[in-house]
Amino acid sequence: MEKIVQIQDVTKVYEEGKNRVVAVDSVSLEVKKGEVLLVMGPSGSGKTTLLSMIGCILHPTSGDVKVDGTSVAAMKERELPDIRKRYFGFVFQSFNLFPSLTAAENVEVVLRLKGWDRARLKKDSVGLLGRVGLERRAGFYPRDLSGGEKQRVAFARAMAGDPPIILADEPTANLDSKTGKEVLGLLKEFSQTAGKAVVIISHDPKAEAMAHRTVFLEDGRLKQ
């Protein structure tokens, strides 16, 4: 499988006054198209920081991050939004839906940001919701959706614009066991049918069972 993300000796240090915290310490990692990569580890091990550097949300203190062969670690902040829009879809454990927008409108927001033609917005957003089994809920507001349905909307939004990489931070944390299993199944389906690279951070043992590969992070370092 073709590599789409390459991380080489990446370190992230937070410094505030005399306090110095090494959140991620000399991590090297590759992610391939069509692969589900699971990153596990205890709370505070640096998993979310690592995911944020992969997704060009945080700059590494040192080391290199390549996305589709392009080095992004040294890019200026103003250059990163275009990389994020082109390559990444994000799924968060708290859903992060706009409460005043319908399910379809929550998906449309991302399509607008990616420059989608206005005439296609509604059709494409409803189509994406259909891919996660929520076409009939397109006009519902988040308050009227179950936790599992909200996460499915978040998946549809992450898929908007057909990004090649999906990053999911604890996507089952707020879901019951059955719904969590369904959500993980969707992520694996995305990787297999569309050839997307999927990176999941999770404590959920069900995620380990469906991932193609699992790595463990502890105290900011990959365990061998």
Image: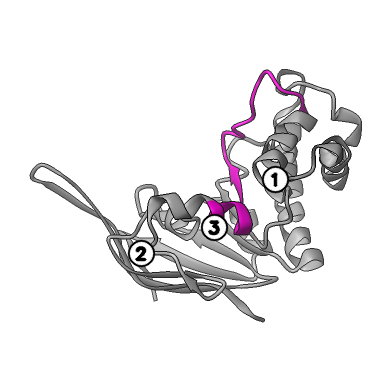
The residue sitting at 76% across, 33% down in the picture is 149
Q: Which residue is mark 1?
A: 115
Q: Is residue 33 left or right of residue 103?
A: left
Describe the element under mark 3 as helix, strand or loop.
helix
> Which residue in the rendered view is the most extreme toward the bottom?
1
Q: As rendered, which of 112 and 9 lies closer to the eye?
A: 112
* Disc on the earlier residue, 2 or 1: 2
Q: Amino acid at mark 3?
A: Ile
| Pointer 2 local density, CA inside 10 Å: few below 14, some 14–19, many at least 20 | few
Q: Secondary structure at mark 1?
A: loop
Residue occupying the point 70% across, 30% down: 147
Of badges 3 and 1, the one in the foreground is 1
Snapshot quadrant of residue 31 = bottom right
Identify residue for label 2. Answer: 74
Nearer-the-camera pick, 77 or 198: 77
Using the numbered discs, state the Cα–Cα distance from disc 2 to disc 1 in whole angstroms: 26 Å
Type of amino acid at the residue the image marks with label 2: Ala
